Amino acid sequence: MRHEAKISVFDSGFLVGDGIWEGIRLHKGKFAFLDRHLDRLYAGAAAIDLDIGLARDELSTALNTTVERNSMRDAVHVRLMVTRGDKTTPSQHPSNCAGGPNIVIIAEHKTADPDVRRNGITLFTATVRRPGPEILDQRLNCHSKLHEVIALIQANKAGADEALMLDPTGAVATCNATNFFCVNSGKLLTSSGHYNLNGITRQVVLEVARLNDIPCAEQSFSLTDVYSSSEAFVTGTFGGLTPVIEVDGRLIGSGTEGPTTRRLRDLYESAVDADIGP
């Protein structure tokens, strides 16, 4: 039961944000793009010198067992979290961890709001920047998300749904919890990837765009390019593709979902079906 789920107050993820995680979608009884998610999880673990303690097939079995025991097959979002484990005392030092890592799997029946998907969201450009790898490599899907939370608070207080974040050079990087795309002069643009999590949905959208001859580029671009775009959308495992209708009070295109966004959503959903198979 939900109220019975517990973890120690000495857990290293709770104490110092020392851990990694993945958000995974269960679709028609199978996890979409599971191999890609596990690739990213194990790469992140190697980068922070964290032994997950389970082989990939064992972790896959744990995921499937969790949803099967809860009779879940579709419209399920799973949060897979791995921390360095319980500490003997509040401390940053990894040597103070006693025992192995803690692995938490939270599976919930959860779907994106259809009104949001239809009507789109608004963004506000936060003053908080995405740092470079010399501070914290943004390719790590780690538990330390405070800078993104602060950016989201700024956006919410400005009346927007999410925060658009810039990189140290002032170019557009990403949003606080999703990846950002815009269509400018007929070309699909997203950031260079140096200052954002390389989202699985982002990867698939770029792949289907290239396969279907939709001009696209991963490059640096500025807010000027965003403001003059004909379309914009964000991507994420939970919501798929969500149109952006306004950025910093400026209407994007017609203020409604555009044709490129609709086409890419259809192509993405077909890619999900192809990945999970019959």
Image: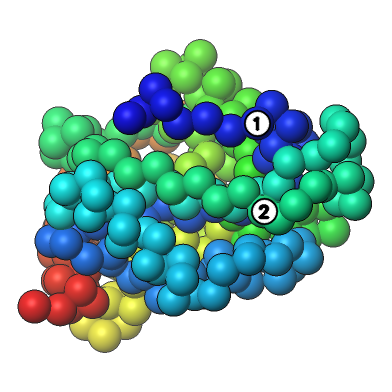
* Position of 270 relative to 265 (above/below): below
Q: Nearer the viewer, residue 184 or 115?
A: 115
* Callout 1 secondary element: loop
Residue 240 locus on image (x, y percent): 27, 53
What mark, if any, has residue 8 been given in the picture? 1
Circle 2: residue type: Pro
Q: Nearer the viewer, residue 267 or 62?
A: 62
Q: Is residue 87 left or right of residue 4?
A: right
Residue 233 locus on image (x, y percent): 32, 49
Quarter holding the C terminus is bottom left
Q: Residue at x 40, y 68 (%)?
A: 60
Q: Is residue 136 left or right of residue 153?
A: right
* Callout 2 secondary element: loop
Q: Residue at x 63, y 38 (%)?
A: 145
Label 1, label 2: how far apart the Cα atoms are: 12 Å
Identify the colour scheme used: rainbow
Q: Residue at x 43, y 48 (%)?
A: 105
Residue 186 locus on image (x, y percent): 30, 67
Residue 84 locus on image (x, y percent): 72, 51
